[in-house]
Image (cartoon, rainbow, N blue to C red):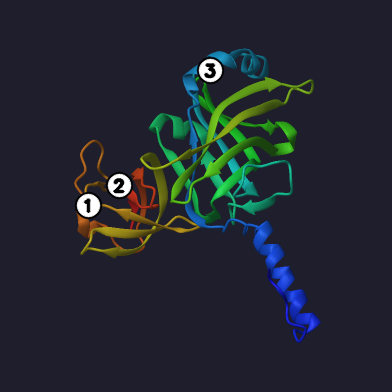
Amino acid sequence: MFRLRESIPAAVLAIFLAAVVLTAAGCPASPPEKTDSKVSVVFGSNVDPAKKAASDAQSLQEKCEEVPDVYSSLTVTVTDLSVDYAGVDPPSGGEVENIPLLSEPVEVDIFHLDETGLSKVLNSVELPAGYYTALHVSFENPRLLVQLAGQDILFDLQITAQGSLTINTTFQLPENDCVLLVDFGGIHLSLDGQGALILTPNITVEILESGTSIEAEGTIKSVNTDNQTLVLDIGLVNAKVDYSAAGIYLPTDTYTPSGTEADLVTGAEVTVAGVIGSDGVIQANTITISSS
């Protein structure tokens, strides 16, 4: 039988008994640690302008009295993009943390994304791995350029919900680096009672490990000829580009690239098309130089 000596102070006895109770009951588990993941945020689209010409023919015919010959571009300015972070555990309806993904507006031509089969790099950010419950996106200045009877006509559009949309969707970011694809998967044009063209988008979110085709426009900030990489200033962030396998197009080139590594100089404005890896590095297939 275990007996305590009378000389043990009461305070020491209380600490000893508390330790016994905690040992028997088990200490509460520590909350999971948050780890950050480097996320390349890209904007994509599978909107087919030819199909839009068929699906929205009635609305545009009412607006301009005949169906346009060509849908040239559908351009929007993305003014805000953010996600709601719920934590490392599956969401249960508790509080969330809103995390912005953009630091300044970005202009995107939705039709151009579809025609090239590429996505546009919006940003590269550090986000906590775990569960997210919503994407918030705001647009401004939507405009549609069409060709009608041989002339270019620009329509100013309106967007449903005053241009601020919330996509309630649960997705999980892994602990390793990844790509967050904001996909402009579908749009619809309609006429309201005042004759204004209303743009209704259908946006989805997809997490990709690697291999996403992208397009990035910007200015060459630096070139490392030893490992055949360059740093591209795309306005919001600097993107690292591996050009070792890229065809380099000069402003005068059409079908065949004639440029060399020597044409990739600091300050040159270029368009890079290629594949973005999970590490955020763009493996360039082509680099088109627009000015130097």
Mark number for residue 154? none
- Nearest the viewer among 289 and 48 is 48
Mark number for residue 284? 2
Q: Secondary structure at mark 1?
A: loop
Circle nearer the viewer, 2 or 3: 2
Q: Position of residue 102 (x, y in %)?
A: 58, 53
Q: Is residue 2 above or below residue 72?
A: below
For marks 1 and 2, give the CA distance: 8 Å
Q: Position of residue 113 (x, y in %)?
A: 45, 34
Tag 1–tag 2 contact (CB < 8 Å): no
- Nearest the viewer among 226 and 93 is 93
- Nearest the viewer among 258 and 214 is 214
- Nearest the viewer among 258 and 46 is 46
- Residue at position x 59%, y 32% in the image: 203
Tell me the residue that label 1 is attached to: 244
Q: Position of residue 243 (x, y in %)?
A: 26, 52
Q: Quadrant of the N terminus?
A: bottom right
- Asked whether residue 233 appears in the rendered view, the answer is yes
- Residue at position x 47%, y 19% in the image: 50
Q: Dividing the picture into quarters, in which one does residue 265 lie?
A: bottom left
Q: First in sequence: mark 3 or mark 1? A: 3
